[in-house]
Image: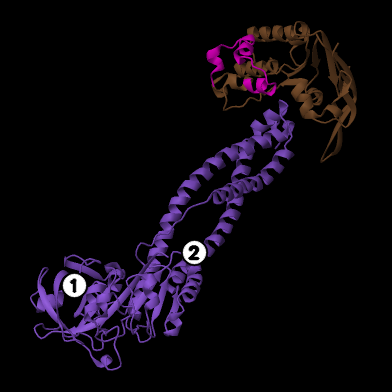
Chain colours: A brown, B purple
Amino acid sequence: MSTLKVEDVSYSYVNASGEQQVLKNVSAEFKEGKMYAIVGESGSRKTTFLSLISALDKMQEGDIKYNRKSLRKIGGSEFRLKYVNIVFQSYNLIKYMTAKENVEVAIDFDNRKVDANTYLKQVGLSEEEGGRLIGKLSGGQQQRVAIARAIASNSPIIVADEPTGNLDEDTEEKIIELFKDLAHKDKKIVIIVTHSKKVAEHADKILRLRRGELS
Amino acid sequence: MKDYSYELSSSANSADLDVVESKNEGAPGGGFGDGMSGMPGGRSGNSSDDDSKLEGDITISGINAYAYISGVQNETFTIKDGEYFDEDSNDKAMISYEFAELNYLKVGSKFKIKNIYTEKEIELEVIGIYDTSEERSNANAIYMNIETAAKFLGSDDYKDGKYNVSNVNYYMNNSDKAEEFVEKVNADFKELSENKMKMAIDTSEYDAMSGSIESVGSFATTILVIVIVAAIIIVTLIVTINVKDRRYEMGVLLSLGAHKRNIIGQIATELLIVGTLGFVLASISGTFLAKAMGQGILESQITASTQQSERNFGRPGAQVGGSSKSGGMPSMPSMSDTGGQNMKQRITASRNQDIKLDINATPIDFLLLFVTGYLVIILALILPSVNVLRYQPKEILAGKE
């Protein structure tokens, strides 16, 4: 069984007030086939934690291991390319491309020949919507494109930062089901940072971050 | 050797014809400009000491080809009526417009003039009437082929194909081989030096023209260096701005797992594609431009050279005419029979007729263009690449950069 292990990870940064300890000896274990929700009040460093497990940022202490392979050895780029994909709160889509082209970027990284519309359909977007430029889509549609891109990357770990923040209730429901299917049917590790109680309720396990400590 | 020309000069008189009064005192009598330009009234090619005092009013100018008349080469000579003579136009002559007007002659008219040595009258037919814009021209100069002109010499040897020539010019395709040619001629025809004949090389026109082009070449090299440095700076600037503009896109790609080397590779590929298109266009346009510019420079240099020649026209000592005692000159090998003194055979590497620059870019030139261009691209990529290497996806996507 594939496992993502966070072992005594600490993270700090230096600002005008001096060194700020953000995360302190955080440990957790995420297993394939399960959906995890990380909750916590604003400023609890949920996004920082997400950045560390998705290799967007570097931890100062501790280690993150996927199937006993250390992230430090794998390297950030390689880890993001092969093992993890991120759904950003602000979507981070390439604006001069269409929705379909954004999804194709992730497929191209994997050198697979798959129709991007397959993934767009999974998140409820039609082919016509897939052909639109990102700027011509609503916030909710953009969020779905970001999710489609994450699914398309075929990574075993999907990390999402407030993925339903901009979605209406119906779409939120569909997206939650989609993440659950990714975890339960596709046997991926799904980690969602959320404020939404509804999303948290659907998670297999809820982890709470408080003042940089995970419980 | 590209071509050669030889000239024969003499003079004649006529009791029936009037001569045009000279506009310029001391104007040159000959029409060739090279060999005979300094000789008032023209003179016999085989004059003896006694003969040398004989001088006719009409200048006889024989040349193997009309095109080598100096006025034709300087483009100051035009045919007003009729046509020019050639090797087969025996007993036919070209006369000046003034001479024709004065004596009521027109194309097809026949007139008689007297050999000043033998007093024999020779009938000539007007084949063409010329006009010249040269200020110091001799309107009494009559042009004809060598065989006709030889009839005005002091002996009948011309009937056996033996006569003197006053000036021989060899036109070389390659000035580098002029020395070699002179050495070979001196070695093969030892009688030249025995008869005090002199072979001389004159590459001044060629040197003047090539010097001008070489100076442009040197200037172009300086420009090239400046352009290369400017290109590196400009392309660096453009790529840096482009990379900055695409920072967000690069952040997204990095967050999806793209390696920085892939992103630099993508920028390099885009530049190489655009660069290659540019180099191909530059190769095509550059070849045409080089031809046009090179020919332009050459033509302006020819004009300057011609004007200089005209200024030097008739200058004492500027050109050496000459005479020889006897000899045959219908073709170059028969020159072995030619005797005489002070004969200067002038080798000119280029003339202002038929001069065309052969500007062709070789595959090595194209290779150099492409290699230099790609080097410019590689150098211009250094700074933007350093920027890319500094990029952190999280900071870009968080808008901190």
Q: In the rendered structure, does residue A125 fall within the stretch colored magenta?
A: yes
Above or below, comparing residue A5 to residue B173 in the picture:
above
Spot the residue most to the front.
B160
Q: Quadrant of the C terminus of chain B?
A: top right
Residue B388, image quadrant:
top right
The residue to which callout 2 is attached is B216
The residue to which callout 1 is attached is B93
Q: Which stretch did the figure color magenta?
A: A104-132
Residue B304 visible to the viewer: no
Local crowd size for mark 2, using a 10 Å CA cut-off: few (<14), some (14–19), many (≥20): some
Query: x and y percent of residue B283 in the render?
Result: 50, 47
User: Residue at 28% of width from left, 91% of height from top?
Assistant: B52
Residue B139 placement, left or right of A34: left
The reply to the same-chain question for discs 1 and 2 is yes
User: Residue at 56% of width from left, 57% of height from top?
Assistant: B224
User: What amino acid does circle 1 point to?
Assistant: Ala
User: What amino acid does circle 2 point to?
Assistant: Val
